[in-house]
Amino acid sequence: LALPVPVYSSPLTRCLALARELHPEPAVDPRLMEMAFGTWEGRTWADIGEESLTAWAEDISDFAPPAGESARMLQGRVLEWLDDLAAEARDHDAAQGAAADRVVVTHGGVVRALVGAVLGIAPADWFRLQVDFAAVTLVEWPLVAGAPPRLLALNR
């Protein structure tokens, strides 16, 4: 199966394998990776410790684990990527004469960051967004600065 639209992917194996099934040469961007938990990666809650987990729970939006990133940092890199994609799309679509779809293969945290931005949901409340595994989320991202994005589907 080769989609007739550009496909973008996280470089992590679980996304890249699917992206390669959808397109022979997906564009890979590290800004589409899941939230970085730094030194917490692969550790149990008990190993991380109650004090650190409490600090995180008290400031989910801005607390970053050591060598990791906060939810707000995750959202910043995702929105930076989208701004770059919109600029690329404006150039491409102007040359082609019409707007085109793009497919993005990424992770639940990235989807939550994007949907949170579209709906105006604070990072501390993203846990309320159910993002199903292997589901499709459709977002209309404006190519014109100042136009609002729209959530068209979540978990389709």
Image: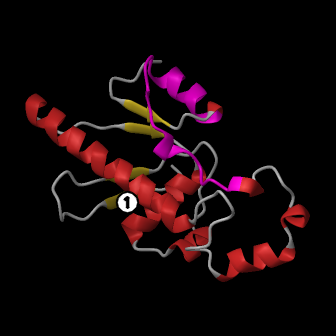
Residue 139 is inside the magenta segment: no
The structure residue drawn at horizontal position 59% and vertical position 52%, both measured from the top left corner, is: 108
Residue 118 is situated, as x and y percent measured from the top left of the image, at: 37, 65
**Chain part drawn in magenta:** 14-38
The structure residue drawn at horizontal position 55% and vertical position 45%, both measured from the top left corner, is: 33
Q: Residue furthest bottom?
A: 58
Question: What kind of residue is marked 1?
Answer: Leu
Q: Residue furthest right?
A: 46
Please say whether residue 86 is visible from this viewpoint. Answer: yes
Front residue of this view, candidates 129 and 71: 71
Q: Secondary structure at mark 1?
A: strand
Count of numbered tags: 1
Where 73 sits versus 19, above or below? below
Residue 77 is situated, as x and y percent measured from the top left of the image, at: 44, 54
The structure residue drawn at horizontal position 62% and vertical position 67%, both measured from the top left corner, is: 64
Front residue of this view, candidates 32 and 95: 32
Q: Which residue is mark 1?
A: 151
Residue 65 is situated, as x and y percent measured from the top left of the image, at: 68, 64
